[in-house]
Every structure is written in C-alpha cells, then in structure tokens.
Image (cartoon, rainbow, N blue to C red):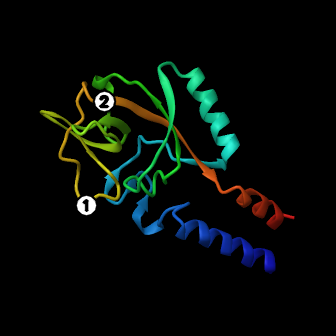
Amino acid sequence: MFRRAARWTLMGLLFWSGGIGAAHEVDGRWIRGVFTGRSPRAVPLPEAEAWQRAGLLSEKAPDSFVLVGSGQSMQPLYAPGAILVLQQYPYELLEPGQTVLYRNRARKIVAHVLVARARDGWRVAGLNNPRPDLEPVRPGNLVGVVIAAFQPLPEELPRRIALLDR
C-alpha cells in the first residue's frame, strides 16, 4: 500500500513539475494544437547517461552537435535543461512537426516547431507562445533540426524509484 501511494506521489510530482506534461494539453503527436509528430520526445535519464547518449549519437550522426535547451517556450515537449542533439539539415527537406533551431534577426538562437511553409519561409511556433513567431525560418537562418532529446533526471529521482521497486 505504501509503495503504491509513494509511486503515485512521485508520478504526481513529475506531472506538476513539467516532467511529464499536462495530459489534457498533449494528444499523441499534437501539443496545444501544434503538430509535433516529427519532433523526438525527450527521454528521461540520469544526467550522466543523458550526456553520454547524446555524445555518442552526435559522434555517429554526420554534421550534428549537442546543446542544452533553456526557456519555457517548448514545454511540455522540452523542459529547460533538456539535452538536444541537432543535425544540420537541408532546408528543402524540412517538414511540418519538426523542431528546428534558427537564428532570429536579434541573432538569438531559437528552438521552435515548424508549423507551415509560406512563400517567405517556414512559420514556426513555441508550444507555450500564444501565436506563431513573426519571423520565418529561411535557408540562411536555419541552424539545425532536433534529432534526439534527453531530459536529465534530478540526481535523487533514480534512487527513489529504485527504492520503490524493492
């Protein structure tokens, strides 16, 4: 009985902390009305393992690199601190639902989801933003496409889960 209650408490904490995401806002490949079906979901792992897997993947995938996400605009898909593996990608092969990194006019790097192709480039949106970005993604400002994501778990969490399974 105690184990079951502890497990549900832990799941509740993950849910409310943004670790899992709000169920009513996530419907399979759609999040808050935005198609994200071509964006990899973040795999929750202990931090050291997350970095190791991201590093191995970036070594194997040509023209790829690793960086850490920040900000709230892509939650619940990617929480702040998510380790993202990106790959340089031909602009002509982009598809709706992919998460891309692009450099905006202010020279800031932004990770948002491709929503629709327009005459002047791709429309992108952050999942927590009320509307799509005003600035399109074009060949000249595209940095890369997210090909994998890992969400580092708090250090104590794997130990707590292991204790619950005893």
When asked about the image quadrant of residue 15, the answer is: bottom right
Q: Where does the image place residue 55, in percent across and percent down from the top left?
A: 61, 30
Name the residue rendered at 43%, 42% in the picture. Answer: 39
Q: Secondary structure at mark 1?
A: loop
For this orientation, the residue located farthest to the bottom is 1
Q: Looking at the image, which residue sits at the far top?
A: 62
Q: Is residue 123 above or below residue 142?
A: below
Residue, far right: 166
Q: Earlier in the sequence, mark 2 or mark 1?
A: 1
Q: Quadrant of the C terminus?
A: bottom right
Q: Which residue appears at 22% of the width and 56% of the height?
A: 131
What residue is disc 2 on? Answer: 142
- The residue that appears at 32% across and 25% down in the rendered structure is 93
x and y, in percent, of residue 72 in the image: 40, 56
Give the residue type at disc 1.
Pro
Image-based side of 83 in relation to 91, left or right: right
Marks 2 and 1, Cα distance to the nearest angstrom? 23 Å
Q: Residues within 10 Å of mark 1 (few under 14, many from 20)?
A: few
| Residue in the image at 13% along x and 33% along y | 120
Give yes or no for contact between labels 2 and 1 (Cβ–Cβ under 8 Å): no
- In the image, farthest residue toward the front: 106
**Quick one: SS at disc 2?**
strand
- Disc number for residue 130: 1
Left or right: 25 with respect to 136? right
The total number of labels drawn is: 2
Residue 126 shown left or right of residue 165 in the figure = left
Neighbor class of circle 2 (other Cα within 10 Å; few <14, some 14-19, many 20+) is many
- Picture coordinates of residue 50, whole percent (x, y): 64, 41
> Residue 156, which numbered label?
none
Mark 2 belongs to which amino acid?
Leu
